[in-house]
Every structure is written in C-alpha cells, then in structure tokens.
C-alpha cells in the first residue's frame, strides 16, 4: 500500500477486528472538527458554511458509489437508511425477501415496517450462508417488492454477486447493505437499487458517517413516509403549509437536517480509499484474510466457508478449533496483542490492508499457543 494511505492510520498492528469497528482515518477525524471550528467562529451565517460543505461531501459520496449527483445522500447508520426504504414500502403490498441469517440491522427495519402494514417479510433460511441467486429464487415471486442482502456477510466474509442477484430479483428492487465491504472491496450501486452502508467499519470514517445511493426507480416505488421538512421542495417557504412535495433527489430520504458531520467524515474517508486505490486495497485485504485462512486451516480449524473462489470472499475469516472455547481464546489473544471478535461461539478475524503481513504470523503463533494449552 502507498505511504499516503498508510499514513492515515495509527492503530496497533495486532488490530484484526475491522468487521467490528475500523479505527478511523486521520482525515475522517479532522474533517468534522475543521467544519465545527469554522462554524464556531460565528463570523457569518452557519448555514452558509454547512450548506456548501454538505453539498461537496454528497458529491464525493455519489462519485464513490458510482451514481449521478442527486442519487446519493448521507445516513447516520446502515439501519437508518434501511428504515427509510422499509417504511417507504408501506402501502406497496407484496413481500420482501431477506436471508434469515442477515445481520439484525437488515432484519429489524423490514419486521418493523411489516408490523405497521409494510410488505410481508420472507426470511429465507440458507443453511450454508451462500447467498446466491438460486438460494433466493425459492422465495422471490411476482409479488416481491424488494430483495435485501449484504454485500459481504458479517459472519463468513462471503461476497455476493450483486448483478446476478439483481437479475434473479426480476422486477423487485434490490437493497445492498454494504457495510462489511465498503472501503475494503469494490462497492458501488451497480445493478442494485439501494446501496447503504455505515462508515464505522472498513471505510474507517468514524461513527454516524453512513452513505446511501439509490437508483431512479426508487423514487417511483417508495412513498415518502419518513420524509421531513428538510427533504421537501422549498423547505424554507414556511408560509406554505406542509406537506410540500418531496425533493427529487436522494436527500428526500433525510428526516430532517442532514447528517452533516457524518457526511464530511464519510467523504474524507472515501477520499482516503481513493488514495490507496480500491483495487490495491482489495488485493491486500484478500492476501491477509487468505493468510489467516491458511494458518487456521493448518490448525485443523473448522471454517465457515461458503465461497468457491477468492472472488466470492472478502476480509473476514470465522472459525472454531475443537477443544478451544472461543470466548476464552479471544480474551487470551487480546492479552497477547491481537484484537479479534467472538461471534456465537466462533472466532472472527478481520484484517485490513493496513495490517502488516508479519502480524498474521504472530497471530498464528499466539493461536498455536492457545491450542497447545487448551
Ligand atoms: C452486515 C451489517 N450491517 C449493518 C451493521 C451495523 O448497522 P448500523 O450501521 O445500523 O449500526 C453491521 C455491524 O454492526 C453489519 O455487520
């Protein structure tokens, strides 16, 4: 990785937990502070400072997600963006198809919307967590309004083929929760209708710094259920009583004032990704997760591995080793300087492009000690 990219980060080398939280890039930490500092001077209208700052950030977000101006917005979290879409489908009838094993952020919005008249939720059991068109096709029918999937599975690192799933979805919208990919692998709207991602993991944007991109047909299919005062035409024409028509841009999915600090942090983090080059980052992430995979397999670990090629996986390796309790192992590894996560009795390791390769060897040695002492 190039120096400009590497210089943005300062976490300790043994941090292998980017699927949980990605320590933020320096630029992403400085951008919101700089903006707050400007407003703090109080030498002109704050709106004249934050308006252009937000627009600039939104342009960066749109460019990074591969959509035209007007088709991207900021969100405080992945869930907030998905809520917007789920509640926009109230009144649309039909069903929403979602793998049953999705992270809860991509389950609750559909269930909550269903409970107040939204589409029926079809949670598809996929035993091997391989989310491919065949696995979803069993649940998709002419009444399917939307198919909701993760770009990268939080448990296994399995990476979907977005365009193939969009083909299988037929006329239904496709929503991609991109948080386990954005910043680590190529991640754009592509053939999907909604791409939504928090910024707190691989993107390394800090917190409350999510992004969302939508396709043109989203504007026709969704009701503006959660559209608020900031997200309508002539929002400042207070003499005209609400409701005003929703904006013709993706900012119609804001409930109120935009998520300004998050938007500038996300834009700064996306610029850092550009500095590194997403292809170079993806190769580095795969090399490191591949090294983790090789070493745990050499210890006879059981790995949840739904992928059939490297093109179907990303930065996550989740395994268990017979006789080694995961919670204790994660604690002992932390004491040895390696930060990883326990998830439902499994050990999840998630290095980034900034992880030095030799650290994976050190992690292997620490794990081997654990196995020996178990
Ligand atoms: C796949 C996935 N989606 C969403 C989230 C988080 O959602 P939110 O940004 O709403 O907290 C996580 C992890 O925290 C995740 O792994």
Image (cartoon, grey):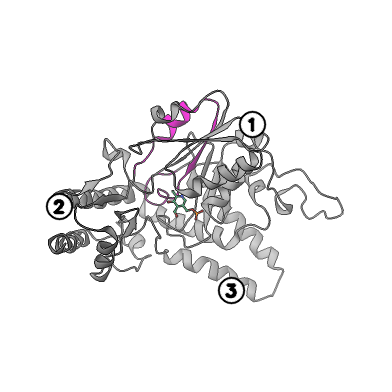
Between 83 and 1, the one lying in front of the other is 83
- The mark that comes first in sequence, 2 or 1, is 1
Q: Position of residue 374 (x, y in %)?
A: 16, 62
Percent from the top left, x then y, of residue 187? 43, 44
Q: CA distance from mark 3 to mark 2?
A: 52 Å
Against 296, residue 93 (above or below) is above
Which quarter of the figure has residue 151? top left
Q: Which of labels 3 and 2 is toward the front?
A: 2
Figure quadrant of residue 230? bottom right
Evaluate if marks 3 and 2 touch, with contact meaning CB atoms under 8 Å apart: no
**Residue 292 shows which numbered tag?**
none
Tell me the number on the disc at residue 299. Answer: 2
* Residue at left offset 54%, top offset 47%: 108
Q: Residue furthest top?
A: 142
User: Mark 3 vs mark 1: which is more N-terminal?
Assistant: 3
The residue tagged 3 is: 37
Dot 3 lies on which element?
helix
- The kind of secondary structure the magenta stretch mainly shows is loop
Q: Is residue 176 magenta-colored?
A: yes
Q: Residues within 10 Å of mark 1 (few under 14, many from 20)?
A: some
- Regarding residue 238, the answer to whether it shows in the image is yes
Residue visible at 69% across and 42% down in the picture? 224
Q: Residue visible at 56% across and 23% down?
A: 142
Residue 70 visible to an observer of this rendering: no
Q: Which residue is mark 1?
A: 93
The alpha-carbon separation of the residues under discs 3 and 1 comes to 48 Å
The residues bearing labels 2 and 1 have C-alpha atoms spaced at a distance of 50 Å
Bounds of the magenta span? 158-187
Q: Pick whichever, 346 or 147, lies toward us.
A: 346
Residue at 34%, 42% (x, y): give it.
158
State the residue lying farthest toward the left: 372
Q: Quadrant of the N terminus?
A: bottom left
């Amino acid at each position: 990785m190039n120096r400009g990219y590497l210089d943005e980060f300062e976490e300790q080398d043994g941090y292998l937990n980017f699927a949980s939280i990605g320590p933020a890039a320096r630029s992403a930490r400085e951008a919101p502070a700089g903006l707050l500092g400007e407003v703090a001077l109080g030498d002109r209208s704050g709106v004249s400072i934050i308006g252009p700052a937000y627009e600039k950030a939104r342009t960066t977000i749109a460019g990074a997600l591969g959509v035209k101006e007007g088709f991207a917005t900021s969100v405080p979290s992945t869930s907030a963006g998905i809520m917007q879409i789920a509640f926009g489908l109230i009144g649309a009838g039909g069903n929403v198809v979602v793998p049953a094993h999705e992270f809860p952020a991509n389950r609750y919005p559909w269930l909550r919307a269903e409970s107040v008249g939204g589409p029926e939720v079809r949670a598809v059991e996929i035993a091997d967590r391989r989310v491919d068109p065949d696995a979803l096709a069993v649940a998709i029918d002419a009444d399917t309004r939307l198919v909701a999937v993760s770009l990268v599975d939080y448990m296994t690192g399995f990476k979907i083929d977005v365009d193939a799933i969009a083909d299988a979805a037929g006329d239904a919208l496709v929503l991609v929760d991109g948080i386990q990919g954005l910043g680590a692998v190529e991640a754009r709207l592509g053939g999907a209708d909604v791409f939504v991602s928090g910024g707190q993991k691989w993107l390394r944007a800090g917190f409350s710094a999510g992004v969302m991109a939508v396709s043109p047909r989203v504007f026709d299919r969704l009701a503006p259920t959660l559209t608020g005062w900031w997200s309508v035409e002539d929002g400042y024409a207070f003499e005209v009583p609400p409701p005003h028509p929703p904006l013709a841009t993706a900012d119609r999915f804001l409930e109120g004032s935009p998520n300004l600090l998050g938007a500038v942090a996300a834009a700064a983090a996306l610029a850092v990704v550009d500095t590194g080059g997403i292809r170079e980052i993806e190769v580095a992430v795969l090399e490191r997760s591949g090294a983790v995979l090789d070493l745990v397999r050499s210890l006879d670990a059981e790995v949840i591995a739904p992928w059939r090629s490297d093109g179907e996986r990303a930065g996550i390796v989740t395994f268990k080793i017979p006789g080694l309790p995961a919670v204790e192992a994660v604690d002992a590894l932390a004491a040895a300087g390696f930060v990883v996560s326990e998830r439902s009795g499994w050990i999840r390791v998630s290095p980034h492009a900034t992880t030095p390769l030799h650290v994976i060897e050190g992690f292997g040695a620490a794990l081997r000690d654990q196995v020996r002492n178990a």
